[in-house]
Image: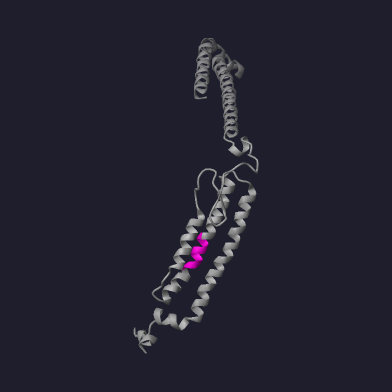
Amino acid sequence: MRRLLVWSALRYWGRRLAAAAVAAPVGVLGIPSTWLGRKLGWSWLMYPGRRLFWRLSNTAHAARLARDAAIRQAFDAEAEQAEQDNEHDARPVAATVPRAPRHHNARTATTGDGMSDTTPGGPGFLFHEAAAEMEAAAQSYDPDGMMHVLATCEGMPYAVQSFANTFRILAERSDDEFPLEKEVGAALNEVYALLMQAVDAAAEVVTVFRNVHDQDIARHEDPRNNAEDKWDTTNN
């Protein structure tokens, strides 16, 4: 487009030079007519060369404006068409590739506990292994004191929140990234909603813990004269 606009400008200035060349001899011949027009008060006899030059220049300028507008309009139309072509080429795969049948073949292995493990391309993210590690940690948990148990309970809402977020993330990715039906994401979202209720329940555990053991907790969090250890029942 820039090259065409430059060409249009050069053409305009070329026409102005041509107008000057044509108007120059007319201007010379118009010297006596200009003098006569002043005497008679006839303005149409005055400056014929100048009037001819500006008339030709204005015509050239109007032609340039129309030509530049046509160039820009053609360029905008081409750009819009190219953008539409890019949008057509950038359509998601789901819009161009047909879905596989709902009940297509997949390798299904049965684990020792009777649960099936479908692994079409490898195990990938095994959520149950991470959950099993948490369960094993709870089984072997040996706190040094009840304040440690309180700290564990206070972390439970965050743990359940992370647990719930796993289902939320999988639901979002099922809809946006994975070639899965919408029902899968909806089912994961239902689990997420239920687990969010468990977050509130886990927070309630902390409230109950602190309410029923408020005096015991106060001896640790707000000790009197730093001598609360004298209330230790093992020493009395």
Residue 188, by quadrant, is: bottom right
Residue 180, position in %: x, y? 60, 45
Of 98 and 131, the residue lying toward us = 131
Left or right: 142 in relation to 5: left
Q: Quadrant of the C terminus?
A: bottom left
User: Which range of residues does the magenta coloring cover?
Assistant: 155-162
Establish if 171 lies above or below 19: below
Of 46 and 115, the residue lying toward us = 115
Of 208 and 234, the residue lying toward us = 234
Residue 160 is covered by the magenta coloring? yes
Establish if 174 lies above or below 219: above
Residue 75, position in %: x, y? 57, 26
Whether residue 42 is visible here, answered yes or no, is no
Extreme residue in the front direction? 112
Left or right: 1 in relation to 100: left
Whether residue 136 is visible here, answered yes or no, is yes
Residue 194, by quadrant, is: bottom right
Establish if 62 lies above or below 179: above
Residue 93, position in %: x, y? 58, 37
Name which residue lies at 52% across and 23% down: 5
Name which residue lies at 52% across and 17% down: 11
Left or right: 142 in relation to 168: left
Name which residue lies at 53% across and 57% down: 165
The image's colour scheme reads one colour
Residue 59, position in %: x, y? 59, 19
Left or right: 134 in relation to 102: left
Residue 103 is covered by the magenta coloring? no
Extreme residue in the bottom direction? 236
Q: How many marks?
A: 0
Establish if 98 lies above or below 41: below
